[in-house]
Amino acid sequence: MRISLCYLLAAAVLPAAARAQSAPPALPAHDSPPRLNDLVHTRLALRFDYARRYAYGQEWVTLKPHAYATDSLLLDAKGMDIKAVALVQGAGQQPLKYHYNGRQLRIGLDRAYKPGEPYTVFLDYVAKPDELGAKGSAAIRDAKGLYFINPDSAVAGKPRQIWTQGETEASSVWFPTIDRPNQKTTADISLTVPARYVTLSNGLMVNQKANADGTRTDQWQQTQPHAPYLFMLAVGDFRIQREQWRGKEISYYLEPQYAAQTQAIFGRTPEMLEFFSQKLGVEFPWTKYAQVVVRDYVSGAMENTSASLFGEHAQGTARELLDWEYSLVEREIAHELFHQWFGDYVTCESWGQLTVNESFANFSEVLWAEHKLGPDAAGRQAYRSLRTYLANPANFTKPLVRRQYADKEDVFDAVTYQKGGRILQLLRHELGEEVFFRGLNLYLTRQALGTGEAEQLRLALEDASGRDLTSFFQQWYYRPGHPVVTINYGPWDAATKTQPVTLRQTQGGAPYELPLDVDVYAGPGAPQRHRLRLREATQTFQLPAAQRPDLVNVDAENVLIWQKTDNKPLSAFVYQYQHAPRYLDRLEAILACAAHPEDAAARQTLLAALSDKYYALRWTVLENIDLVKQPALRAAVLPMVRRLAAHDPSPQVQAEALKVLGKLGEKRDARLFTKALDNRSYSVQGAALQALAAVDLPQAVRRATALQADHRAPLSAALVAVYAQAGDVARLPFVLAQVQAAAPLARLNMLPSLAQLLARVTDAASFRTGLAPFQQMGIEYKPFIGPQVLTMLQNLRTQTAASPIAAPAQQAIGEAVRAIEQAK
């Protein structure tokens, strides 16, 4: 699974990571689920009641006792009506006694069955997901398993769909099963749906039958065993594009209006399949691979076996795709595809071992970027993971392998995903490319179609490498936190021709053992690489250097998971930008120089970085300079900023350059802003519109009105900001519609503009309506942005104190504040 919404919000608003790393709080321990009965085969026949949001199901589930004889069976079955339970005996059935408590179904068998002796139970049931009252989590916003989207067609223009989301244990909302990750079963799923819709499920469609009542029954078979949480179905009006890879069907299911962009979005899938298959030495293990995009999905995406499901952010118009970065959808495609090996083919044996699923999927995001887009894109993606992990100090108390947690959903966090992915990168560096992937091959082949855990991964990597990795796993898999290191440089010793470098670990607990690749740049030619080990809390290394080094680059391969304070002089950072090759080297240098715009060499470095080969670094410079407060820097870089605003091939860079110029507010740039409004990129148009508003607000409002005919997220936010700046209260319905339709992070960023406009509203009913997004965001995302939303509301209270509607406005604000404060 790829999760996004809450972590994006968290990264946007949480302060920088604290240095304190305390012990994990006392939490309940969770052992691996016991296996009393093993699933063998699950056959389902489903039809759907759109009006009531029910699924009418019949199930034939075959099981066998695992290790001990048993005369009973316990199935998870959440919120169902159970109509019949029977033992299948040839062509007949024998009713069985059962007890059902609304969550689990305990069945008494006709006799005791021996270990390995199969038996089949028939169940007739009604699944009622919308009546379950299931609660989601920060990672997966809902847990009702089966979702009816716009079932009564009440929302014009919104498709009518059905889809499922099983992880963690929500498949048992739509069919009775043993809903645990250490169970595996083959499957046969028949779906009876309106004939105008297409269906998708695991495995291959083996039969289609038209029915007399205008429905059609599609039969899907998954012949290889997989975990219940990976069962899936999707029903709707999708356009399907198909192609072949090594004789297997690869297909893409999108809404009709986005079908023309199918190849632009998903077209690299066959190349990914080939790359991952060759890299792992295990061919893609399933009979087909499909990818479907659905509405109102409850997370980012999900790796259902042979059929990954994506939220609606994964489809867009040709214009929207101009603004897409690797981190939005292509990364997600790689993530879910890699899960087909790590998660589906070999599944975590318990949720506490989720690292063997999700850390690998996160790792694949860097692996694919490195292969397809180059080292800078890979370095950026790896650094994004490190920053996400470090953004929340709560992450520092949790080990990667986690037996103790309050709820299984809590394991879906930046420790399991981002930190775990970085740990795999570190392992790859430690063992070397060939040995590391040989170890992954051993792990996959040994655990094929079964389950896995970190210890089995360790043993496979040890067998591949001949090295004892116990200490590595104890340090990185079982210990919470990370090293916090300060790096200091002594004076170069001309007599001994050595450069001292001192590293001091300041985190709590025992010191970490860290591999250190240190590059010493001293004079012309290539740097000298030193491979060292940091083992002590404070350790000084004497590095050979024939002359005073221009740069000592610690962790030259940028693989460590740490917080570092690198006390090198600014001159070394300037040299680092010019000579150290990696993305993070250049990024660190840019940030150091941006903090010292008074230095001439720093200004020249920033100017040079505005021409960096990698767009994200040009973008970083623009994000970190202030030409209003820094006249010397403005004189140095302003011509280049104007060139980027007019001509940079990256829409992100062009848009950011326009924002920089907009803050300057020079009327001479009005023509540049106006021309940029004709750009096809919504990001560029949005930035140009707001920049134009800074120099000519009436013209910006006129252009905004025309741009309303075709706008998406970045431009939509700009329209909202311009109308708010103009104080045009008549635009409140439009502004409110854009805020309500926006994705959570974009909605959060629009709230200040909405507040600015609400402060001018003189109609009490309209004011109260306009407060709804503040209350909804403050409640839904309270752990992440609750205080921020409350601050906005308090500011709005001040701004409306003298309003003609002061009394009702103050009352409405007070009610919203109390609702957020009281929310749990």
Image (spheres, helix red, strand yellow):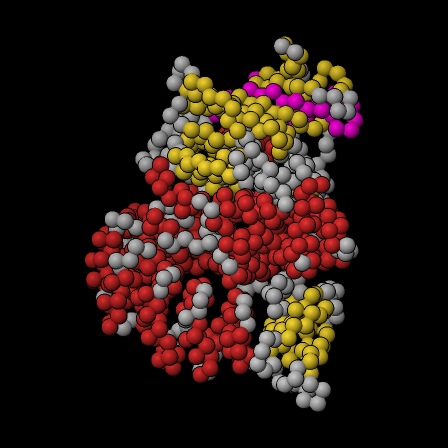
Q: Position of residue 530 (x, y in %)?
A: 68, 72
Total number of numbered discs in the rendering: 0
Magenta region: 54-83
Left or right of 82? Residue 741 is left
Q: Position of residue 290 (x, y in %)?
A: 49, 37
Residue sitting nearer the eye, 557 or 17: 557
In percent of the image, x 61 and y 81: which residue is there?
522
In percent of the image, x 51 and y 31: which residue is there?
201
* Furthest residue in direction bottom, as rendered: 495
Q: Is residue 74 magenta?
A: yes
> Residue 183, located in which quarter of the rendered image?
top right
* Furthest residue in direction top, as rendered: 92
| Magenta portion: prevailing SS class | strand
Q: Is residue 684 visible?
A: yes
- In this rendering, the answer to whether 254 lies above or below 695 is above
Q: Is residue 468 magenta?
A: no
Residue sitting nearer the eye, 22 or 272: 272
Left or right of 54? Residue 427 is right
Residue sitting nearer the eye, 704 or 438: 438
* Furthest residue in direction front, as rendered: 246
Q: Position of residue 145 (x, y in %)?
A: 53, 34
> Residue 178, located in which quarter of the rendered image?
top right
- In this rendering, the answer to whether 791 lies above or below 742 is below
- Quadrant where the N terminus is found in the figure: top right
Q: Position of residue 56 (x, y in %)?
A: 50, 21
Q: Is residue 400 visible?
A: no
In percent of the image, x 32 and y 70: which residue is there?
643
Left or right of 138? Residue 679 is left
In percent of the image, x 50 and y 43: which residue is there?
270
